Image (tube, rainbow, N blue to C red):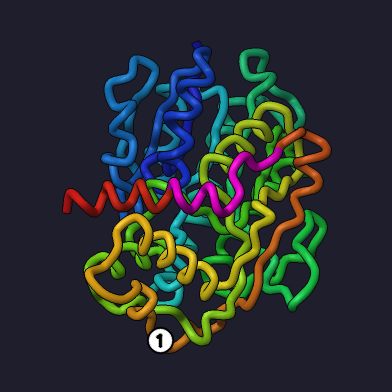
Amino acid sequence: MKNILVTGGAGFIGANFVPYFIENNPEYHLVNLDALTYAGNLENVSEVENHERYTFVKGDIVDSEFIRNLFDKYQFHDVIHFAAESHVDNSISGPEAFIKTNVLGTFNLLDSARKLWMSAPNQYNETFKNARFHHVSTDEVYGTLGETGLFEETTPYAPNSPYSASKAGSDMIVRSYFHTFGMNVVTTNCSNNYGPKQHDEKLIPTIIRKAITGENIPIYGDGKNIRDWLYVLDHCKGIELAFKTGKSGETYNIGGRNERNNLQIVDRVCTILDELKPKASGSYKDQITFVKDRPGHDLRYAIDATKIENELGWKADENFESGIKKTIQWYLEKFKNK
């Protein structure tokens, strides 16, 4: 049985990916490495904690000696790398952790993998001849769009926050290991994910949480910032597909083709909440308030997913309407117990 390292598997996207991958891939034993900082929570992966092909390890990818020892112990055949500091607001107030985790952490993983898998540039050891490093990244590395156009894999990088700059740096290091060492790497850049297990402070969980507790629902600026929303399980399916069938050295953009501005999001969530959990009087929309915009808030992100659709056959199973209903129902259940 092959060992695969999944980093950040207790975070939002990772914790949706881990049970999905274990179920679909009986030939793998999955080691979930997570530092359990801001977004990581073991409750997110409770459904697999006793699975025979699952091991959880608490640790930090910034600790290079720890990472080397982990690779020695488990002889990882593959790596899927989610672990990242990812909250843009936090990257404005405390950028150092983002540079360390996202840049140095990614380097530590890549270099440990290279030393285990390869004897020299372009020479894989026989046991690891098909070993692959899959790097999970974001559309924010491309900067911001005007009212038209889409991010393609060939769009020049123009990151605007310390978060997106650190992810751009990590993408470039992954790229360099392909071009310099001939390492088998794939990168995916995704649009905004939504769905179960997301941190309570993110936009959609915040709208739901504030709505049902009767608090003001805060929306940045004028609410006109546009994001391309991707249901998290669709993203997980795209990652698995690119990991298994993507071409080495290539990047694949994964997007939902569901552009919405923040006003449309809050309006839709409140409308569904009005149906599922009506207030005694009025609508949840009455709680919407506008707050000072975040510095350097990118206006619009949207992904062109044509490459992964055409070359690998991926397509999103959920549209925004179906995905948002599933999401709201999941959070209502979660917050009910709090």
Estimate how packed mark 1 is, as few (under 14), some (14 to 19) or many (20 or more) residues with alpha carbons within 10 Å: few
Q: Is residue 11 above or below residue 303?
A: above
* Residue that appears at 33% across and 46% down: 35
Q: Secondary structure at mark 1?
A: strand
Q: Image height check: is 109 above or below 203?
A: above
In the picture as drawn, the residue positioned furthest to the left comes out as: 338
Residue, x 48% and y 36% (percent of image)? 17
Residue 298: image location, x then y, percent = 60, 76
Apparent side of residue 90 relative to residue 116 in the rendered image (left or right): left
Residue range corresponding to the magenta coloring: 315-326
Foreground of the two, 162 or 129: 162
Tell whether position 107 is magenta: no
Q: Which residue is at 59% across, 44% downward?
A: 318
156 shown above or below 33: below
* Amino acid at pointer 1: Val
State the count of labels.
Answer: 1
**Residue 325 in magenta?**
yes
Q: Position of residue 164 (x, y in %)?
A: 58, 66
Outermost bottom residue? 292
Camera-nearest residue between 274 and 45: 274
Residue, disc 1: 291
